[in-house]
Amino acid sequence: MLKAWREIPPTAGLPLHLRDLLPVRRGDFATQAARFLGVSRAGLECSGTACLIVILSALRRLSPRSKVIVPAYTCPLVALAIAHCGLKTVLCDLAPNSFDLDKTALAALCDQDTLAVIPTHLAGRVADVAGAAQIAHACGALVVEDAAQAFGARIHGESIGLMGDAGFFSFAAGKGLSLYEGGLWVARDPALAHAIARVSDEIVPVDWRMEWMRSLELCGYAAFYRPSSLNYVYGIPLRRGLRTGNLEEAVGDVFDPELPLHKVGRWRQAVGLRALKRLPGFQAETASQAQRRITQLAALPGVQVVADAVPNAQGVWPSLMVLLPDVQTRDAAMAELWGAGLGVTRMFIHALHDYAYLRPWVEQGDYPHARDFADRSLTISNSPWLDDADFERILTVLRRCCG
Ligand SMILES: *Cc1c(COP(=O)(O)O)cnc(C)c1O
């Protein structure tokens, strides 16, 4: 009976403890986060989007180039951040059956006006940044890794974010470690890191009103981020969106083009510092759960588990991303699973050119693999709250739909 009220979050966010919220101990979150990543320097901003804004603003001061190439299937905030900087979003199709950039398409797009290319580590899966960098660098463009969903992911034992020229992580609600909203940027070249830090100092103000709001929201996150209460803040709005057919609203794909920029206060940093101590254990637990469940999923005929785009990667596992044979099968599975409280959802509803509200900033074009990925993918939460019995229910539906 009680189980009927459980709502599993769509990703494995690190739950906060009430003692994380105590107003003691000072410390600099960016320094400790850099230590966790094993990088020499990192900067904290109010969101992943804000990180991208300060990175691109710094690049823009170094070059008159105006185009930024992004995967045609990614977070709409990326296009809004590019527009915020007065730059132009150029979409690149995905490789077939993959979340990663198609290298042939990328090579065709890169030219003398390309400022940056943004490979994206979607759902904790590691993208082929070296491959993208080879193409980008050949035309004089830089590589900015979107690691919003992959804080803690490594390749050859080193943090992602530094295989290219710069990168950023997100601490939004549900993206692993959370400050409710927050982000961390890194840059490989110390001179570039310095330039980004200088831009941040210049364009990011202190805003106590915003900080108060985010602090209250973080308290709300600590209180409600558990299966017994997520129904109220996540499940009910989701099911309302599904009922009214507003899928973009249901998954939270619609963002205000007015992007907030403000400094993150000391208290939220202290909350993050305490939570950060538990992150390695949590990531080890979710990684081993993911390994077991991927094996089970991969055994189902017709189900493809989306994997890292490169060997020797140690990604992180907020959710398990899978591709079904076609859109009808995916939709049939989602009809049973989406509103069921089991943490099954879709990542982004559309490829970027298919969002009506992004039309002012995103050109129309032909991106068949991105559309295909949007049509055939779904994500299964990798939260430890999704127990084996719940996961078995998901497997049963997938087996029936794909059979
Ligand atoms: C969430 C996300 C962002 C933006 O991060 P915020 O912290 O929400 O601003 C950018 N890219 C991807 C792929 C994301 O998932």
Image (tube, rainbow, N blue to C red):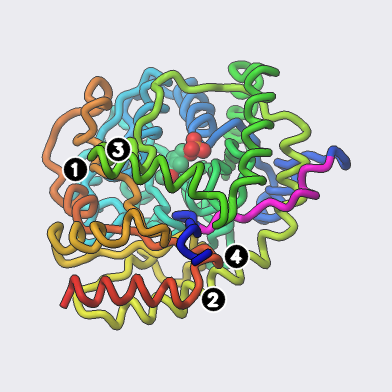
Which numbered disc flags the more N-terminal residue, 4 or 2? 4
Closer-to-camera residue (128/251): 251
In terms of image quadrants, where is residue 203?
A: top right
Q: Residue 330 lies in magenta, yes or no? A: no
In terms of image quadrants, where is residue 206?
A: top right
Question: For the point 20% across and 34% down, which residue is it?
Answer: 353
Residue 126 visible in rendering: no
Residue bearing the label numbered 3: 248
User: Looking at the image, is 51 positioned above or below residue 306?
Assistant: above
Percent x, y of residue 285: 60, 71
Q: Is mark 2 within 8 Å of ligand 1?
A: no
Residue type highlighted by circle 2: Ser
Question: For the point 45% across and 23% down, which residue is it?
Answer: 60
Q: CA distance from mark 4 to mark 2?
A: 9 Å
Callout 1: few (<14), some (14-19), or many (20+) C-alpha neighbours within 10 Å? few
Question: For the point 35% across and 37% down, which residue is it?
Answer: 253
Which numbered disc flags the more N-terminal residue, 1 or 2? 1
User: Looking at the image, is 238 positioned above or below residue 49?
Assistant: below
Which residue sits furthest front? 1
Q: Secondary structure at mark 3?
A: helix
Residue bearing the label numbered 2: 288
- Give the main secondary structure, helix, strand or loop, of the magenta stretch: loop
Percent x, y of residue 82: 38, 27
Residue bearing the label numbered 1: 108
Residue type highlighted by circle 4: Gln
Q: Secondary structure at mark 4?
A: helix
Which numbered disc flags the more N-terminal residue, 1 or 4? 1
Image depth: mark 1 or mark 3 in front: 3
Percent x, y of residue 123: 42, 56
